[in-house]
């Protein structure tokens, strides 16, 4: 979370100057000092100390905020808290303190809206420990790319939250790992006619679905977010992949047919069917936006941005 906040501030040309000393304040970490803040007009005009409070089940208490205020330097502060923080506890702060607090709901929405809507440009990369699938299949090639292709989200987090009856929760934007399959092979038509074809499909182990991929689905300038991998058992075997793809690859095509005389011609639909034995597969990992949901009781789930359904971690 801290890296995400820093990346967003940096993308908005908010320069964070390091603090002179490492403040040992339990639960509060000073990210730095900002000369200007585009998101907070109330604190503009002078230096603002930006603080981060890590996630926990219990909200920030009055005693914690009072201990923080004793050691906190300056009098302008912006607290980004992954824990609930009630404004009532700020009443005990010194009169000259000007503090803006963002709790988990506002913080996660700020991150989700600011990053996943594509308004911010934050570089995305693949960590060195990215896991590549091992296989003995001779016609399967695994690619390692320096950058994962990202797909656009299809739902808005705010719209989903409005219809969610589960109450308060913390939401953190993440990417869900999927596979982009590039396939080539032969189609067999009438009279054993052959035609070479190429396809691209997304295998989504979260939705347990395969669907065609096109460049229009690419999420440009995707952010650098935590990547969540599915359970290994949810990936399709090569045999199952071929079986599921067959009805998607077979198609009917209009063919002209000459009868006994050239005066009579007809157009009919003829089947072109994929030759499964001719298929060659290669894949690279890709990613789809989602959100990690952290409920009040500590339960965690994943919200998928393509179908609005939740999945276990």
Image (spheres, helix red, strand yellow):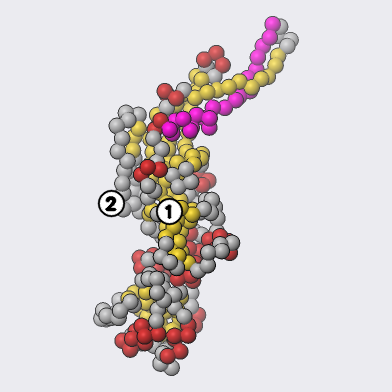
Q: Position of residue 28 (x, y in %)?
A: 34, 77
75 w.r.t. 120: above or below: below
Circle 1: element type: strand
Crowding at label 1, few (<14), some or many (≥20) Cα neighbours within 10 Å?
Answer: few
- Residue 184's label in the rendered image is none
Nearer to us in this view, 273 or 164: 164
The residue where tag 2 is placed is 128
Nearer to us in this view, 75 or 103: 103
Find the distance from the CA under tag 2 to the CA under tag 1. Answer: 25 Å
Relative to 159, 99 lies left or right: left
Q: How many numbered marks appear?
A: 2
> Depth-wise, is mark 2 or mark 1 nearer the camera?
1
The stretch drawn in magenta includes residue 258:
yes
Q: Position of residue 297 (x, y in %)?
A: 43, 66
Q: Position of residue 116 (x, y in %)?
A: 48, 59
Q: State the residue lying farthest toward the bottom.
A: 95
Residue drawn at point x = 34 percent, y = 48 percent: 146
Crowding at label 2, few (<14), some or many (≥20) Cα neighbours within 10 Å?
Answer: few
Q: Which residues are magenta?
A: 240-260
Q: Position of residue 121 (x, y in %)?
A: 44, 60
- Residue 312's label in the rendered image is 1
Residue drawn at point x = 41 percent, y = 76 percent: 59
Circle 2: element type: loop
Tag 1 or tag 2, which sits nearer the N-term? 2
Relative to 215, 8 lies left or right: left
| Dots 2, 1 in contact, CB < 8 A | no
Residue 125 appears in the figure: yes
Residue drawn at point x = 51 percent, y = 47 percent: 217
In which quadrant of the rendered image does the C terminus lie?
bottom left
Quadrant hosting residue 69: bottom left
The stretch drawn in magenta includes residue 232:
no
127 w.r.t. 162: above or below: above
């Amino acid at each position: 979370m801290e890296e995400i906040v820093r990346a967003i501030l940096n993308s908005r040309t908010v320069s964070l100057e390091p603090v002179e000393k490492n403040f040992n304040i339990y639960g509060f970490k000073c990210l730095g000092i900002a000369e200007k803040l585009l998101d907070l007009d109330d604190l503009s005009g002078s230096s603002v100390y930006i603080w981060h409070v890590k996630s926990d089940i219990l909200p920030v208490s009055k005693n914690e905020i009072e201990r923080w205020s004793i050691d906190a330097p300056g009098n302008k502060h912006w607290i980004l808290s992954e824990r609930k923080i009630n404004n009532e506890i700020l009443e005990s702060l010194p009169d000259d303190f000007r503090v803006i607090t963002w709790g988990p709901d506002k913080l996660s929405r700020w991150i989700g809206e600011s990053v996943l809507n594509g308004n911010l440009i934050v570089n995305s990369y693949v960590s060195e420990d990215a896991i590549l699938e091992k296989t003995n299949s001779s016609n399967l090639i695994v690619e390692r790319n320096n950058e994962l292709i990202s797909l656009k989200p299809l739902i808005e987090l705010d719209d989903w939250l409005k219809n969610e009856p589960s109450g308060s929760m913390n939401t953190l934007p993440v990417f869900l790992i999927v596979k982009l399959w590039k396939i080539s092979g032969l189609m067999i038509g009438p009279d054993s006619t052959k035609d070479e074809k190429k396809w691209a499909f997304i295998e989504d182990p979260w939705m347990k679905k395969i669907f065609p991929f096109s460049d229009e689905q690419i999420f440009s300038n995707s952010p650098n977010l935590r990547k969540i991998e599915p359970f290994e058992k949810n990936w399709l075997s090569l045999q199952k992949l071929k079986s599921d793809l067959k009805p998607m690859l077979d198609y009917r095509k209009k063919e002209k047919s000459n009868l006994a005389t050239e005066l009579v011609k007809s157009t009919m639909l003829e089947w072109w069917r994929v030759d499964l034995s001719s298929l060659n597969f290669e894949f690279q990992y890709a990613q789809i936006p989602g959100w990690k949901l952290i409920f009040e009781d500590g339960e965690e789930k994943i919200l998928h941005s393509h179908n609005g359904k939740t999945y276990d971690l």
